[in-house]
Amino acid sequence: MFDRLLIANRGEIACRIIRTCRRLGIECAVVYSAHDRGARHVRLADFAYPLRGATAAETYLNATAIVAAAQRFGARAIHPGYGFLAENAAFAYTVEKAGLVFVGPAATTIEKMGSKAAAKTMMRAAGVPVVPGDDGAVQDDDHLAAAAGEIGYPILLKAAAGGGGKGMRLVEKPGEFAAALDAVRREALGAFGDDQVIIEKYLAAPRHIEVQIFGDRYGNLVHLHERDCSVQRRHQKIIEEAPAPGLDPKMRDAIHRTALAAGRAVDYVNAGTVEMIVDENSFYFMEMNTRLQVEHPVTEAVTGLDLVEWQLRIAAGEPLPLTQDEIACRGHAIEARLYAEDPVRGFLPSSGVLTMFTVPDTADGNGDLRIDSGYEAGDHIGIHFDPLLAKFIASGAERTQAIARLSGALAHTALNGPRTNLGFLQALLASPEFAAAQIRTAAIDRDLAQFLEDSAELAERAQLLALAARLARQLGSPAGNPWLAGDGWSNGGAQAITWRLALGDNEVEWRLENTAAGWRVQRAAEPSATNAHLITDMRWDGSDLAATLDGIVCRSPAVDEGGRLALTTGGRRFTVVFVDTHDIGPAADPLAGGLHSPMPGKIVAVRAAAGEQVAADQPLIVMEAMKMEITLRAPAAGTVQAVHVGAGDFVAADALLIGFAP
Ligand code: ADP
Ligand code: ADP
Ligand code: MG
């Protein structure tokens, strides 16, 4: 086994690889970019080598600088993690040429499977069923359009070099083909430096089922069972599980055998994943990922194996640790990906300091809960890299147990700072569709609103907490509580006051009464004994709120964001505005500040002109950022006063793009 390993990655996966190194007694080094100087992977590693620059291209994608760091460290091998250089054949060659071991398959295998086109052509030849379509041997526009017509709409256009759900477009009718082809080529060129496309028949409601395979240098190949990754948004996985629930045993067996056939076709060595798309009675090869997968922990949970250890052993020349018969799948495991992104603003990545991040204790369980995190409270979440914060993995004997544990873990997680998808994950896990294992790959995009809705109970609690925060603030004010007098409070009796607050589109008037037992509050519109609540012992230091609601102590991160109270409860984030006061301020005019760019990027198109009347949600600007096209929409109806950018401009984060007339 190697005595020294360099990890060419960051975030949770670098931290996770370090853990296995510790257990195996391998000294490990990481590399880091300028902004990552204080990052968790740098804090955990034995050694950390700085790379010059801040962007991915300058740092974690800089093969030469990474290999130089490995040589300075005296590493025997380099683990690429996932993303960045993990599927870059040229990098694997460079590592090998430098006399180091690349922890992954041979460079030639990465190359062969790197193009979806070449991979599908090869798998078809090996007798593996592939998704019907055109592998794009001829890239001429008219030829591709004709091929799409023959395949039959709807079709899916994919970047041949694509990955991570990027460079993909659903095309429903021939009339939309040309524009979609342009967009995919543009995105593919920007993200992968290659604008070749392939066309596939679009399957309407499939499942994504993938098989973990492992090969050694002695011709042995095994599978570590399957994972179901059907819970996706925009072709990106959000929740994954093992095994695939409710899969017919015959189909499962066939899927495993097909994955092994795919691996054998390329003499596969090390860890790989064969991704398949599955409908009622058939399954098809989609692509092969020649690396460790983000969701590998669910496989570890059901097999009891350490996949990084296997990768290192095989890279060091050892044979596979177990035979196929020795690899069992026990119980059920589910993983949820926690991202720094804002579900209500189209899931745009969100950055800033993670001022609070507390998760349930994983040390006292029986391994039923695992949290792989790249960050801790106090860390800065930047804009340069993938916004994955952490992965929560829960397991149990049955799927229902795993769901309950995972939901519980998310509910006991408190976050403050960047927006996250925590509430969205909870809504997904709580949905009847997920419970019935009925979510299909395109379902979330279609029914998005359903998962964004706040449950009534949580929304009620959020309002009570907001009332508690305002009570705490105002009662604690140095001048006593003069505001109460103005609201009709008299010392002699329990006269009621009313406060109006807004939560989303809902405005509610609350009636508050100071009684001997505490503050008795109820909706002014429907006063009745049954819907009254009691608030006592409220304390708020500006960031942590504690209050006793109906006898139960509730804690919540709560911050006054310039007139809006942002608080998190049950893992969901709520923004409450008091509309009757300027104290925890009134709702701001959504158009007042103008439309700003959410992150640095390039303007692709401007869809509005000065003087134009626009409707709420109307697309105004298309920009390209984080290798994706993003449409910025009007926050409300209004009139455009000035457009400050044009197509082709590069803009900084927060740059003013469009101003609106007052
Ligand atoms: P998994 O299949 O392991 O779930 P994802 O599709 O979520 O992986 O991708 C994992 C990471 O790798 C993401 O950061 C994604 O953006 C990145 N990634 C995947 N494929 C590529 C690729 N071909 N080029 C660049 N980045 C990629
Ligand atoms: P990537 O390299 O970005 O991971 P994939 O080819 O693996 O791209 O596809 C990503 C996801 O897109 C799949 O998991 C599936 O949900 C969806 N998808 C891919 N191909 C098809 C298809 N032919 N029909 C319907 N959905 C598809
Ligand atoms: Mg894929």
Image (spheres, rainbow, N blue to C red):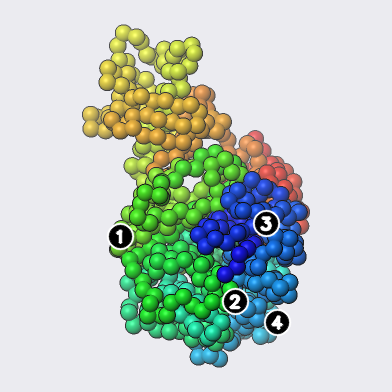
Q: Nearer the viewer, mark 3 or mark 4?
A: 3
Badge 2 or badge 4: first in the primary sequence? 2
Q: Which mark is residue 327?
A: none
Secondary structure, mark 4, is: loop
Q: Visible in this render: residue 224?
A: yes
Measured in 3D between alpha carbons, the distance from the residue under mark 2 to the one under mark 3, in whole angstroms, is 22 Å
Badge 2 or badge 3: first in the primary sequence? 3
* Residue that numbered label 4 is attached to: 140
Q: Are marks 1 and 4 in contact (CB under 8 Å)?
A: no
Q: Is residue 478 above or below residue 110?
A: above
Q: Is residue 643 left or right of residue 550?
A: right
Q: Is residue 334 left or right of residue 234?
A: left
Neighbor class of circle 4 (other Cα within 10 Å; few <14, some 14-19, many 20+) is few
The N terminus appears in which quarter of the rendering? bottom right
Neighbor class of circle 2 (other Cα within 10 Å; few <14, some 14-19, many 20+) is many
Q: What residue appears at the point 73 percent right and 72 percent down from the top-left corner?
A: 98
Q: Which mark is residue 400?
A: 1
* Residue that numbered label 2 is attached to: 105
Secondary structure, mark 1, is: helix
Near-viewer residue (60 or 221): 221
Q: Is residue 306 above or below residue 479?
A: below
